[in-house]
Image (cartoon, rainbow, N blue to C red):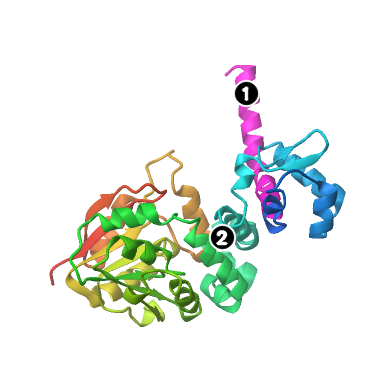
Amino acid sequence: MTERDETALRGELAGRIMGFMLSQAVYVAAKLGIADRVAEGPRSADELARETGANADALYRLLRMLAGHGIFVEREDRSFENSAQSELLREGNGFREFALVFGELIFPAWTETLRTVETGEASFPHVFGGEWEEHLAANPDANTLFNRFMAGSPGAKNPVAETIAGTGWRGGETIVDVGGGNGALVIALLERLPDVRGIVFDLPHVAAEAEEHLRDTGVADRCRVVGGDFGDGVPEADAYVLSHILHGLGDAGALKLLRRIRRAIASDGRVFVVDGIVPGPNEPGQKMMDLLMLVLSAGKERTEHEWRLLLADAEYELTAIHSAESWAPVLEARPLSS
């Protein structure tokens, strides 16, 4: 290794060690709504500070730092405008919610990763005084924020919906989105499947928000919302979607949910699991998310082999893995014959 190579290596490692600083700076800018405040043109830090109640010098230094990383643009007169990246932090693009969720819910738990590694237990309950779902149920603002984050930007669910809709459907079938949040995925599915009916199934405090969201869509007459806990069972249907649900559960919890669905599903039904697949050694994909799931809820990401074993234990066969134009594939499974 040359001296230049070693210097570059040290710089790369240093950047990773300090990465949380950039993440938290983005969170502050998102919290203060800076991207929307400069949407119409350059604004000075003094103006922005007056609007947000921030300290002008501190805000200038924060935005200067972000501009140095391509998030906002600093002009010669010390005013700021949006860059292509900061434009994504505007309201309605999904990334503002991304930054707020990570800043307010994820980062505090992540600071206790050492405790998680030492104990094997999730740190979120230790930090927030309750399990993930308990915390969201007790904090309506956090719950709404998280559901907006999971819904993503307009059209974010389209790639997964296109993939599932393209697997072949019969008229009159019913699909349940388990843990369906505000219904964004079911809405996208029913828009593509005019002869299919949908159910959004989620905890009662989430279901209320889904009902409100559905009223403004063109599929409300073919979709209903059911509030409940999957521990008590799920509505009967021909197909089920589990989008980023099973990775929040350890194997015992995931097995319990899959077995609940197995008892309710039609004999020729299907289950669609939208979750990542952990690759082999030294490949980065899904491994950071895997650790995050451990920190938040003692959940996990899974390899393809682990998915096959889990599904088989719950009496399903993994019949296909569909690539989707999103960060996670769609696993299709069918119940094994009794």
**Residue sitting at 60 percent across and 21 percent down?**
5
- Mark 2 is surrounded, within 10 Å at the Cα level, by few (under 14), some (14 to 19) or many (20 or more) other residues, namely many
| Main SS class of the magenta portion in the image | helix
The answer to whether residue 54 shows anywhere in this view is: no
Q: Amino acid at mark 2?
A: Thr
**On the rendered image, what quadrant is the N terminus found in?**
top right
- Mark 1 is surrounded, within 10 Å at the Cα level, by few (under 14), some (14 to 19) or many (20 or more) other residues, namely few
Question: In x, y percent, where is residue 337?
Answer: 13, 68
The stretch of residues the image draws in magenta is: 1-28
The residue identified by callout 2 is 116
Query: In the drawing, does residue 102 fall left or right of residue 212?
Result: right
- Asked if the stretch drawn in magenta spans residue 13, the answer is yes
Query: Quick one: which residue is furthest to the left in this view?
Result: 337
275 or 26, nearer to the observer: 26
Point out the tag, 1 or 2, that comes first from the N-terminus: 1
Question: In x, y percent, where is residue 11?
Answer: 66, 30
The residue identified by callout 1 is 6
Q: Amino acid at mark 1?
A: Glu
The answer to whether residue 182 shows anywhere in this view is: yes
Vertical arrangement, residue 25 with respect to residue 333, above or below:
above
**On the rendered image, what quadrant is the C terminus found in?**
bottom left
Q: Secondary structure at mark 2?
A: helix
Vertical arrangement, residue 58 with respect to residue 337, above or below:
above
